[in-house]
Amino acid sequence: MNQHIIPEDDIPEGHRSGFVAVIGRPNVGKSTLMNAFLGQKVAIVTPRPQTTRTAQLGIITEPDYQIVFVDTPGLMQPRHKLDEFMLETATEQYLDADVILWLVDGSASPDEEEIDIAGNLRPLAEKAHLILAINKSDLLDPEAVIPRTDAYRALLPEGTDWLLFSAVTGLGVGALLEMILNALPEGPRYYPTDQVTDTYMRDLAAGALPAWDNEEDAP
């Protein structure tokens, strides 16, 4: 990840900053979560899988911290050259992150692909702070909450931070942001305080506007 350190005299002592790779299969809610964090639409939200073809940045800057989110293409088994490129892009992002945010669809049980992703993430827990974010809690029956969360937690090292939340309703989004912030190291600002993304507006307009009629990722 390119790190353009911004020298600013007003950065307070103890300022936290870092890069957060948002990892997950297609349509688990990555783009919806990015937009919820930022309070505006900078990531494409669509029922069509694999719309995010390149990594997108979302940047949150407050007086005492700066979080740089990298919204990666959905992880999947490559079927053609485009899939291979997208998988390579996602892998590069989480290898160089301070925090790896693994987003899963809590309305469904983990399958073989999720097990494979977890197997790739486990060794990285020694290099980056790993967080399991179980999305779509609003679609879970109460009696399914414990067995479903236990099933996903069992895929990762014991003690991995985790949270059940809903990106669509906003329930738990603030708590997830706080969990991410607490995992970041002290550091400088990498981007100007008024910048929220490095995705060019023309790219957003070309790919996202038709899809914004749909307010959430398809379940």
Image: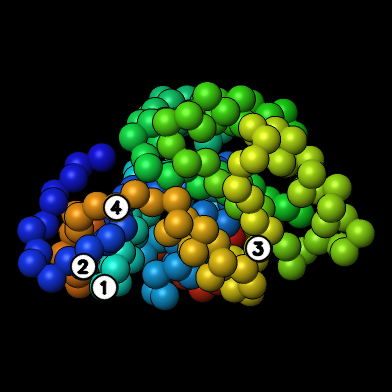
Residue 116 in which image quadrant: top right
Quadrant for the C terminus in the image: bottom right
Between the C-alphas of marks 3 and 1, the distance is 26 Å
Residue wearing tag 4 = 186
* Comes first in the chain, label 1 or label 2: 2
Residue 181 spot, x, y in % from top left: 42, 59
Between the C-alphas of marks 2 and 4, the distance is 10 Å
Q: Amino acid at mark 4?
A: Glu
Instruction: Give the number of the disc on residue 165.
Output: 3
Residue 202 in which image quadrant: bottom left
* Comes first in the chain, label 2 or label 3: 2
Quadrant for the N terminus in the image: top left
Between the C-alphas of marks 4 and 1, the distance is 13 Å
Q: Amino acid at mark 3?
A: Phe
* Comes first in the chain, label 3 or label 1: 1
Residue 78 spot, x, y in % from top left: 52, 26
Residue wearing tag 1 = 63
Residue under the image location 52 percent in, 41 percent down: 130
Q: Secondary structure at mark 2?
A: loop
